[in-house]
Amino acid sequence: MPVLTRLIPSPVVVDIRAGALSDLAAVLADERVSHSGRLAVAVSGGSGARLRDRVAPQLPGATWHEVGGGTLDDAIRLADEIRGGHYDAVVGLGGGKIIDCAKYAAARVGLPLVAVPTNLAHDGLCSPVATLDNDAGRGSYGVPNPIAVLIDLDVIHDAPARFVRSGIGDAISNVSAIADWELANRVNGEKIDGLAAAMARQAGEAVLRHPGAIADDEFLQVLAEALVLSGIAMSVSGDSRPSSGACHEINHAFDLLFPQRAASHGEQCGFGAAFAMYLRGAHEESAHMAEVLRRHDLPVRAEDMGFTADEFVRVVEFAPETRPGRYTILEHLDLKPTQIKDIYADYVKAIGS
């Protein structure tokens, strides 16, 4: 009887610990990512550039490329710079924009990508998607998963706390995203990938239920692992469904309607998830999610982010237009503005001040 299985695209190295950056060259050599040390290293002008003096002595055969920002043009320019360089791999060292530029450039020239994030702002650090600004606004581009992910918890501690908080919101929102996927299955028969759903759900629950704080290595370890698992879950399912539901529709609506005032990705997703849980009648779960978000100093009301209730009503009304074809609790309820306003008022009372 044949053994039926599937191959899951995932990194060959996931190294999450204090001091991981000091072993970058050794890890890449040991895991046969780069014996020669011929690497193209993409860095930002910020956190990545500050770490260059520390990392460069480990990588004498590397070529360093400073990436200006997180645009499609930046990524194409990086690809043009590294094409023909006979490199073993591309290393993205920096925040999310640099990682996404490096992902896209590596895919364009057919090289593996090593992700070395300097913060934990969202699950893009290990996802098969590069999100880049373009002339039409912002686009998501399919790319291979990183071949290796190294996360140095000492480096994460040095990053601004707001980045960790954003990652918390993004990870926790998985719980709401999976509930939306299950809703789409019940109502429309949309197929659920059970493995992807299990990975994403457990990643979100691990962060949601961990008692630690952002200053604790134990908590940062769980958060980093959750973000990596979320990215792999998207590879398993072949799309962003395991980590993106009404929570992300609300996030995208904030970005599109109020581009100059929007909060961080994770702040908006976390708040969107707590509200979406309330919409689907899971009031206790919504209250618990809001409690955890508040404990980590994340917003749980529109007013916490500087928006009025009426502005939030506009956001929720517009949110389904951001992901045509995706069925979530927002599409299911198809609420009118007056209904949204009333439910939001009830939600605010339910979660307390």
Image (cartoon, helix red, strand yellow):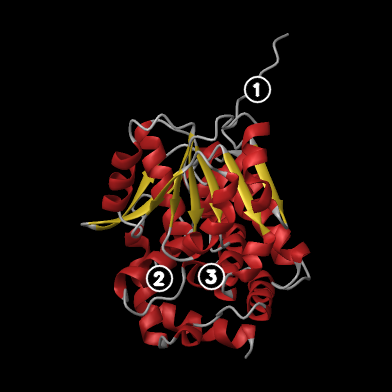
- Identify the residue position indicated by label 3 in the image: 279
Q: Nearer the viewer, mark 1 or mark 3?
A: 1
Element at label 1: loop
Residue drawn at 51 percent across, 46 percent down: 127
Instruction: Work out whether 42 lies above or below 51.
Output: above
Describe the element under mark 3 as helix, strand or loop.
Answer: helix
Q: Which residue is mark 2?
A: 335
Of marks 1 and 3, which one's residue comes earlier in the chain? 1
Q: Circle 1: is it few (<14), some (14-19), or many (20+) Cα within 10 Å?
A: few
Amino acid type at image mark 1: Thr
- Relative image position of residue 316 (x, y in whole percent): 40, 72
Q: Quadrant of the C terminus?
A: bottom right
Dot 1 corresponds to which residue?
Answer: 5
Q: Amino acid at mark 3?
A: Leu
Measure how far apart labels 2 and 3 are at the Cα level: 10 Å
For badge 2, the amino acid type reads: Leu
Labels 1, 2: front one: 1
Q: Nearer the viewer, residue 114 or 255?
A: 114
Between marks 1 and 3, how big is the CA–CA gap? 38 Å
Residue for point 42% across, 46% down: 102
Residue 325, given in percent of the width and then of the height, sits at 36, 49
